[in-house]
Amino acid sequence: MVDYITKAKRCKFDNSANFGSVSKHDDGVAAEFYQKSATSFKIDKSWDQAGSAYIKLAECHLKSNRNHEAAGAYVESASCYKKISPIQAISCLEQAVNLFSSIGILSMAARYCKEVGELYEQLRDLEEAIKHFKRAADLFQVEAATTSASQCKQKVAQFSAQLKLYMKAIEIFEEVAQEAVNSNLLRYGVRGHLLNAGICHLCIGDIVAVSNALARYQNLDPTFSRTREYELLTDLLAAYDRKDVEKFTEVLMDYDSLSPLDSWKTILLLRIKENLKAKEQNVDRA
């Protein structure tokens, strides 16, 4: 019987690293070889070669119409490539997502599509991250995985706002808030979603639109007007309307001392503050 582990070790030192000699074997024997080769390379932490072996394993499974097994092999390959090359990991995960989708295992497709979005987030490619988090949200929605779908939608909204696509972000945050109001599981997050939407409105700088939004949010959730998030938005709006940078800063500091602002909110609030400074300077010049 072929000593697959020894053969895999030899492949490690073979620059071809394409396992071409396996072509002489039938698909079943080849698949076994690639599986054991990949395991050996993983043990040695030879991530590139392990990833390559898993891709070959996936291709063997595809030849035998074992799409589920092929998808699993692509996932294993991605796990190896994540150690050294996020781009290669993304390529493998996208193959897995497409295969899981084709055989109707949408929960797995959604899971790995979300993972692709997270990798693009790490690479700071927000446009690609948006694309994949949106697809993941749609897949989770089909599977009635409302919490996971909501998490992905929030990512889409946050990245859209970072790219200054504020209206798109507002629409998604309000949609997520509406869904959360009707869910005992998600209701706790309503005020946070409305705060995020309100901050995006302030980024646009339309005072009337912000006031109208706050009125709509009270209708959506009557308890919202009794929250610190609502108080923050109304105080920021008042400072913005008066073009008072000092008051705007004071309001933020008071809120942050009790409820620390996350980095996303901080980025957007700094943008608003810069806009406000510009307005204040224009008033001074006048």
Image (tube, rainbow, N blue to C red):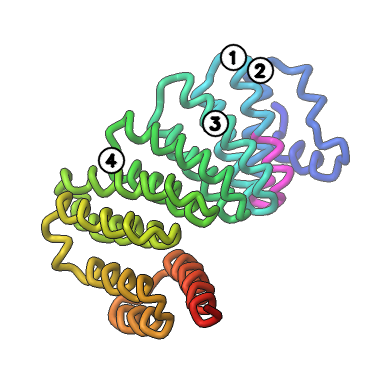
Mark 3, mark 4: which one is toward the viewer?
4
Sequence-wise, the earlier of marks 4 and 1 is 1
Q: What amino acid does circle 1 point to?
A: Ser
Give the class, few, some or many, for how many residues have Cα within 10 Å of label 1's Cα (few <14, many ≥20).
few
Calculate the distance from the C-alpha at mark 4 to the C-alpha at mark 1.
35 Å
Residue 146 x %, y %: 28, 40
Q: Nearer the viewer, residue 218 or 48?
A: 218
> Residue 138, position in %: x, y?
39, 33
Mark nearer the viewer, 3 or 1: 3
Amino acid type assigned to the residue bearing label 4 in the image: Thr
Residue that appears at 42% across and 47% down? 167
Q: Secondary structure at mark 2?
A: helix
Marking on residue 64: 1
Looking at the image, is mark 3 or mark 2 nearer the viewer?
3
Q: Which residue is mark 3?
A: 96
Image quadrant containing the N terminus: top right
Q: Residues within 10 Å of mark 3 (few under 14, many from 20)?
A: many
Identity, as a three-letter code, of the amino acid under mark 2? Asp
The label shown at residue 27 is: 2
| Tag 1 secondary structure | loop
Earlier in the chain: of badge 4 and badge 2, it is: 2
Foreground mark, 2 or 1, reads 1
Q: Main secondary structure of the magenta part?
A: helix
Range of the magenta residues? Answer: 41-54
Label placed on residue 146: 4
